[in-house]
Structures are given as structure tokens and as C-alpha cells.
Amino acid sequence: MKRIHDAFAQAREHGGALIIYVTAGDPSLDDTVDIVLAAERGGADLIELGVPYVAPTADGPTIQAACQRALSAGTTVGGVLDAARRIREQSEIPLVTMTCYNPILVYGLQRYAADAKAAGIDGVLVSDLPPDEAEAWLEAARQHELGTVFLVAPGNTDRQLREAIDVTTGFVYIISRPGITGARADIYEGLRDLVTRVKGMADLPAAVGFGLSTGAQVAEVLAMADGAVVGSAVVNVIAEGDEDGKLPQRVESKVRELRGGSRDVRRRQVCARRAEGTGDPLGASGASVYGNAWPHVKGTPSPGRSLSADTFALRGACSCPTNRMC
């Protein structure tokens, strides 16, 4: 779990955490190991390893198809954990498994928690497990020091948000819009209000997922949240196959595009604010996004203050009048 929190803290230095989802076993578990390492090289800060299931909850057609490919290739829960172990032998990137409840219930909650911890898994997101029915899983996760991740969504009441946040120990996963996963062309207009509500209640990092597919969308999300989750856009690259033997390179390129695109957009946002003379690279959201969520991180501004441009530390070509961000 410590790796999760450390990754979010370190990701602040480049504007927020990029979390990449891949369906384990698509196209094979050997490929999954190579794909995750490639995603890390491309700039991913955390990885979600999807455990394929015959009836995935909330997944759109892209990830449903990936689950089917993985299951057809013989992927099992134990196989996913073995792949995680092989990743951990080569990398310290945080690993979170995303699964429906049934696969780990059949595997055995205590057994899954113990094996996941031994494999180097840092946290588990159970997509269809309501917080008020999670006592048995929470106990298993606590005993084996696994971070718990719960979903919150548009339409949740404050009571529902609080229930999910109170049992979360890894990071809060904010669903960006009503509906299922899948690449979208825009950001749900009510997202900022939802993020603000969550961050007003949570002392843990909050990440947004579902529907993000471009660097610009990642940047827009990172202007309000601590992390952005991209799944279908990367899974689509994997779905193209590996006939050329360059699948890891293409995944790395896609992740680099997402990370680079988000930095470009954030750099322009910072430059625009600098040119306007505000001196505040994050705008009014800076204090609420970072100050309230990171009271334990050295150098974090207290609530009511924002990060300085130097702390934000964006690098690269810049057109702002003072050139101080370059």
C-alpha cells in the first residue's frame, strides 16, 4: 500500500498520477508482463491489472472483448497473480488488481489476499462490491496490508460517498460519468463538482476514470484530481495484436502520448495563468486539490494556499512572457 501513496506523492511533481489499466492475459500473461513494463517506461505511475471475468461489471465493449480474449487464452486468477509476481521482480511500480467479487470469492478471500500480497500487489479494487457488504473482504485486506479501492460515482449521495471513503485505504476511484467504460470525446460536465465533494471528505488521493482517452482529457482531469485512469484507449492498442512483434513499443508510445499530451496542455494552462499575472499555476483549484489532500507531504501548502510555479515544476518549451516555467 505504501507504494500507492508514494506514487501519488511523487506524481505531484509532474502534475498528477497517470494510471494505466490493462486486462491481464490479453493477449497472454507473458505479454501482460511486457505491456506493464512498457507502460511504465512510457510514463505510467500506477498500473491496474484487470482480472478477466465472464460477466464484467460496468465494462464497455472494448474491455469486455479483452476479457473474452484473456479467458480464451486460459487466464486464471492464479495466473494473474503470477504475472504480477514477475512484474514485481522487475519493477517497483504500484500494482492494483481490478476484479469483480465472484472470482476472488471462489478463489477464497483470505487466500487471495495472502497470494496477492506475496505476488507484490499493493491494492485491490472490487468493482461490484458495495462498501456496506464488504466486511469480510476488508478484514482479509487489512490482515495482509492490501490497499482497498472503492468506486464512487455521479449520483451518489453524501452518505454513499462517505461510506465508500471510510473503507478506502488506497485511493478513491471516481467514475467520471454515468454509464460504462470506454473512450469518450468529452468530460462529463458534473465531474468537477463530484471531485470537489469527494476531496472535501477524503484525506486520501482521488483518481478519475471511465471514458478518458486523450492527453488533453488526462490534463483536464489532473487539474482537479490527483490521478487519471486510462483503460480502453490502451486496450484498443493491445487489441490490434502483435503480428509485428512490437506490441510493447506501441503501448509505450501510447502511454507516452497520454503523458506528453497532458503535460503539454497543463504547460499551456500554466503559461496562460502566468501571462495573466495570477502567479497561480493551478488556479483556485490548487489548494483544494493538493493542500487538503496531502497534509502529510512535506512542502505541501496548507489549505487556502496554492502550489507555486516552481513547486509545480513543469519542464520543456514554454511561450509564457516570463519564461519562468522552462
Image: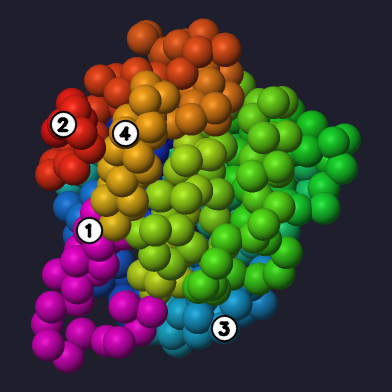
Query: Label 1 crowding class (10 Å Cα cut-off): few <14, some 14-19, many 20+?
Result: many
Does residue 274 belong to the magenta stretch? no
Gap in angstroms between the C-alphas marked 4 and 1: 28 Å
Asked if residue 28 shows in the view, the reply is yes
Q: Which residue is mark 3?
A: 61
Tell me what residue is drawn at x 12 percent, y 88 percent: 244
Neighbor class of circle 4 (other Cα within 10 Å; few <14, some 14-19, many 20+) is some
Q: Could you tell me how far apart the alpha carbons at marks 4 and 3 are, in whole angstroms?
A: 44 Å
Q: Earlier in the sequence, mark 4 or mark 3?
A: 3
Mark 4: secondary structure: helix
Give me the residue at 44% from left, 85% from top.
69
| Callout in the foreground (2, 1) | 2
In the rendered image, is residue 118 in sight? no
Residue 296 or 85: which is nearer the viewer? 296
N-terminal label among 2 and 1: 1
- Residue labelled with disc 2: 323
Q: Residues in magenta? A: 236-260
Give x and y (percent) for residue 279. Answer: 37, 22
